[in-house]
Structure formats: C-alpha cells, structure tokens
C-alpha cells in the first residue's frame, strides 16, 4: 500500500515513505493486506474519432452509453474499420478501469469479478483485456464463458466528449455462485456500477451483483456504487433512491446522473440530497471540477483554512478539513462538503474525457482502503480513536481525486499507465526544499 500519509499541502500524492507510526509498529513488516473488490461487465473499448452525423445515423445519444444489437454493432464496426477511424483499443469497463487505476495508485491489489472467454487467441479482445490490466488486479476469480467479452465503441466527438455503443457479448453471464464469499468478506470496499442491471431478461448479472451486496452487508463491507449513465437511472429513479438507501454507503456520479437521481440541477444541492440516503458522495462536474459531501461527528469537525465558498449552501466548505464517517457511527452527524476546481484549470488540450470520473473514484477508494490498512495495522493510532471512513479530510480527497482526473484527461486511455509523479512539475523547486 502506497500511503497517503505525510503530504505537502499544495497537492496530493501517495508518498513512498510510510506513516511514521507504521514504521515504528512491530506488525509493519508482516502487515495485513487490504484490497478492494469490484464487479464489472468485462469490456474492451474500441476508440474512434467520429462526427455527430455518424452518431445520429446509428441513433446514439451524445455523451451517453447505449446498448446496441449485434447487427448495428457489426455495421458500426465495419464502417469504422473501412474508414480507418479506429485509433485505439484498450481494456475498459467502468469498474475494471477503477480497480486498475486503484492498483496503479496504491501499488496494491484489487480483485475483479466478471466473465472471461475460456478460449483466448492472441490478439483477440479478451487477450487485449488481460494484457492491459494491472498485474496488481487479481483476475483469478473471473468466471469462464464460451462466448466473447463485450465491446464498447467509444466514439469521440470534436470536443473530446465520448459516446458509448455497447455490444454486450457474454458480459452479463456472471452467475451468483461465481461470487466468492470470502473475497467479499475481507475487502475494504465492494465497488459496483448501475450498468450491472442493464441486461436482457434472464441474464444472471443482476443476481450476481445482489449476491455480492448481501455478503458485503453480512461482513459490514461498505458498498460503493458508481452511477454509470443517466439513462439507466432515468428508467426508474425511485428504484435507485431506494437501492441507495438500503444498500449503498458511497456513491460516485457526475452532475447529469445526479440531476436524474434527485431532480436537482445544481451538483452541490444534488450531493446534499443524496446524503439523505448514503454516507458519502463524490459528484464530478466536468469543467466545474468536483464536489464531495459526507458526514462527520459534530465534535470532531475541523474548520477549513481555505476561503469559504458561495453556493446553494452558503459557505458550504466550512468544515471540509473533517474526515468522512458513516452516519451510523456519528452521535450528532454533521453534513460536511467540499469543492475543488479542475487541477491547473484543466489540461491545455483534453485528449478525451473518457474515464475522468472513474479516475476520481479510484483516488477516493485508495484513501478509504488506506484507512482500513492503517486501522488494521496500527489500531491504537490516534487516527482511529473515532471510526472514520476516509484516511484524509474531504478537502484532501478532493485534491487527490481531481489530480487523478487531470492525469486521465491528459491521455487517451481511461487507464493510468503509471502512478502520479512524486514531484509536480508545476510547483517551484524551492517548494520541495521547504
Ligand atoms: N472540460 C474539462 N475541463 C477541466 N477539467 C475537466 C473537464 N472535464 C472533466 N474534468 C475533470 O475531470 C473530472 C471528472 O470529469 P467528468 O465530470 O466529466 O466525469 P464523468 O462524466 O464521470 O466521466 P467518465 O464517466 O468518463 O468517467 C472533473 O471533476 C474535472 O476535475
Ligand atoms: O454498459 C457499460 N458497462 C460497463 N462499463 C461501461 C459501459 N458503458 C461504458 N462503460 C465504460 O465506462 C468507461 C468510462 O467511464 C469506459 O472505459 C467504458 O468501457
């Protein structure tokens, strides 16, 4: 576990030096592992630059993810190939990306559950998927299927915005009995996506996901849900609100998904509403940066040293230096909020926005898992006198998440090829010597 321990105040990265408490601890050398587990529809992204006319012709909705039938997928693939439009083919899937990025950032293990073709030819999509996934992401629990994994046509418009057309293959054939109870029981978090319910009638994926969620409840493992696309939420917003209330601790979404879920267009107001149902919210808002909302114990709140921000909740960031807690662990729960504008105002040229939200979530998961790692290995640390969900304050997690998103915007693939730089080029040399 790379550790988000000692950090410089202007930025955030996990430093290689361990927490001093951990180094002093006799258990440090044989420390107990922490990991996250996630379920995904196993997909390869096929990226192509297209114009709006093509999206209209294939009846795709800009910025969204839609499932297409085999005929439409084949016609689209042939057209992209014939016109030499395919630029990259990467492993994808929102949870696969998140776990991969978590493993790269934390330099630690994650476990991915889903399907994989049993017969893999060199160069096939399944082969590419395996080649493009971090060796720290454990793929040993994938369930074998006879058919292909899914394909996600990732169609990039002139402004860098991405539209997805999904050709599912066998990606939804994950069965409940393929979810290993002991793997869920030992995890710091279970990560799922709302895409998992988007299946044909009779496909087992939704039951497999519910099996994992039930085990997570049994072992008090926090369930983290990322909302995927507003279309899935729009099918039945009330069902999702009930699902959040009953099953979810942490939700990650963008402002469109937030609006569909809550009816509120302002991301801060929507994040605040979602706190009625869950414990912690990450809401990304594209060029407006990102928001976090959570709970802390009233007596443990910490006042920010940043300027107070205006918003639908005036001075909403007043206690953003507080660490997030589960609401049930607070005697007097206080709602705390934070916001951060895009790192460095955003990249000069955005390669594409694909996976920027997944990147932000992987940073949050790193912070949550670092907290369980530290709690397990240094239980008497002052950091654990109260049961917190995150290792860091909301403000610090925002910085980290934002920095990771920036890294993703600067590259084509939604998956990081390496961790964040240990020293930011943007900060003057003297800063590091302080
Ligand atoms: N146009 C932009 N300019 C500057 N920063 C941006 C821009 N778009 C995204 N970002 C950064 O990336 C973060 C996540 O972006 P966004 O809200 O687009 O995620 P998303 O829609 O969930 O993405 P995905 O579903 O592809 O993972 C933002 O919080 C912001 O920090
Ligand atoms: O239906 C889906 N299921 C799972 N992942 C999806 C789906 N549609 C798009 N993505 C994935 O979302 C990532 C960016 O956030 C992309 O890499 C894409 O593969």
Image (cartoon, rainbow, N blue to C red):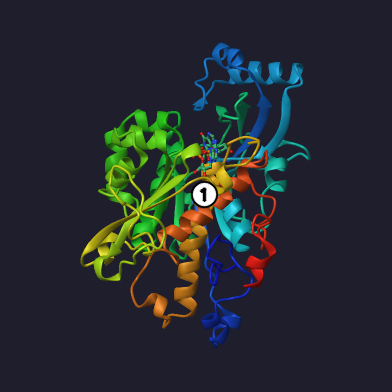
Residue drawn at x 70%, y 18% is: 78
Reply above or below: 386 against 163.
Answer: below
Residue 335, how many percent across, how many down? 28, 56
- The N terminus sits in image quarter: bottom right
Q: Nearer the viewer, residue 336 or 373?
A: 336
Reply above or below: 184 against 255.
Answer: below
Reply above or below: 256 against 429.
Answer: above
Q: Nearer the viewer, residue 20 or 362?
A: 20
In the picture as drawn, the residue positioned furthest to the left comes out as 332
Left or right of 235 on screen, residue 332: left
Ligand 1 within 8 angstroms of badge 1 C-beta: yes
In which quadrant of the rendered view does residue 87 lie? top right
Residue 214, how many percent across, how many down? 36, 54
In which quadrant of the rendered view does residue 135 lie? bottom right
Residue 367, how many percent across, how many down? 49, 62
Left or right of 129 on screen, residue 366: left
Residue drawn at x 56%, y 78% is: 31
| Residue 181 seen | no
Left or right of 338 on screen, residue 427: right
Kindly identify which residue carries mark 1: 360
Disc 1 secondary structure class: helix
Residue drawn at x 61%, y 24% is: 157
Residue 309, how many percent across, how many down? 36, 50
In the picture as drawn, the residue positioned furthest to the right comes out as 122
């Amino acid at each position: 576990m790379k550790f988000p321990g000692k950090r410089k105040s202007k930025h955030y990265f996990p430093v290689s030096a361990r927490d001093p408490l951990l180094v002093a601890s006799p258990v440090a050398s044989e420390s107990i592992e922490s990991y996250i587990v996630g379920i995904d529809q196993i997909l390869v992204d096929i990226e192509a630059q297209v114009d709006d006319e093509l999206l209209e012709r294939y009846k795709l909705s800009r910025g969204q993810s839609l499932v297409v039938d085999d005929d439409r997928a084949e016609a689209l693939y042939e057209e992209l190939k014939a016109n030499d439009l395919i630029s990259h083919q990467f492993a994808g899937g929102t949870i696969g990306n998140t776990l991969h990025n978590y493993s790269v950032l934390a330099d630690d293990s994650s476990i991915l559950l889903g399907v994989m073709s049993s017969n893999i030819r060199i160069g096939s999509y399944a082969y590419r998927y395996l080649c493009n996934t971090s060796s720290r992401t454990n793929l040993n629990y994938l369930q074998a299927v006879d058919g292909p994994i899914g394909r996600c046509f990732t169609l990039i418009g002139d402004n860098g915005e991405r539209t997805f057309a999904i050709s599912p293959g066998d990606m939804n054939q994950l069965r409940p009995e393929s979810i290993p109870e002991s793997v869920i029981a030992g995890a710091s978090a279970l990560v799922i996506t709302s895409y998992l319910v988007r299946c044909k009638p009779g496909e087992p994926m939704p039951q497999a996901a519910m099996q994992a969620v039930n085990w997570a409840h049994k072992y008090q493992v926090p369930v983290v849900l990322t909302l995927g696309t507003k279309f899935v939420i729009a099918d039945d917003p009330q069902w999702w609100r009930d699902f959040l209330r009953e099953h979810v601790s942490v939700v990650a979404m963008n402002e469109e998904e937030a609006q569909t879920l809550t009816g509120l267009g302002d991301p801060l107001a929507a994040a605040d509403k979602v706190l009625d149902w869950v414990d912690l919210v990450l809401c990304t808002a594209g060029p407006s940066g990102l928001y976090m909302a959570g709970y802390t114990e009233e007596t443990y709140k910490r006042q920010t040293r940043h300027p107070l921000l205006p918003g639908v909740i005036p001075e909403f960031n007043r206690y953003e230096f507080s660490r997030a807690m589960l609401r049930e662990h607070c005697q007097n729960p206080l709602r705390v909020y934070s916001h951060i504008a895009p790192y460095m105002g955003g990249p000069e040229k955005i390669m594409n926005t694909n996976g920027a939200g997944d990147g932000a979530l992987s940073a949050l998961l790193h912070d949550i898992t670092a907290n369980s790692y530290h709690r397990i290995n240094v239980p008497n640390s002052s950091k654990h006198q109260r049961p917190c969900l995150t290792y860091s304050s909301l403000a610090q997690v925002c910085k980290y998440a934002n920095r990771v998103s920036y890294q993703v915007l600067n590259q084509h693939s939604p998956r990081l090829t390496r961790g964040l730089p240990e020293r930011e080029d943007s900060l003057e040399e003297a800063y590091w010597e302080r």
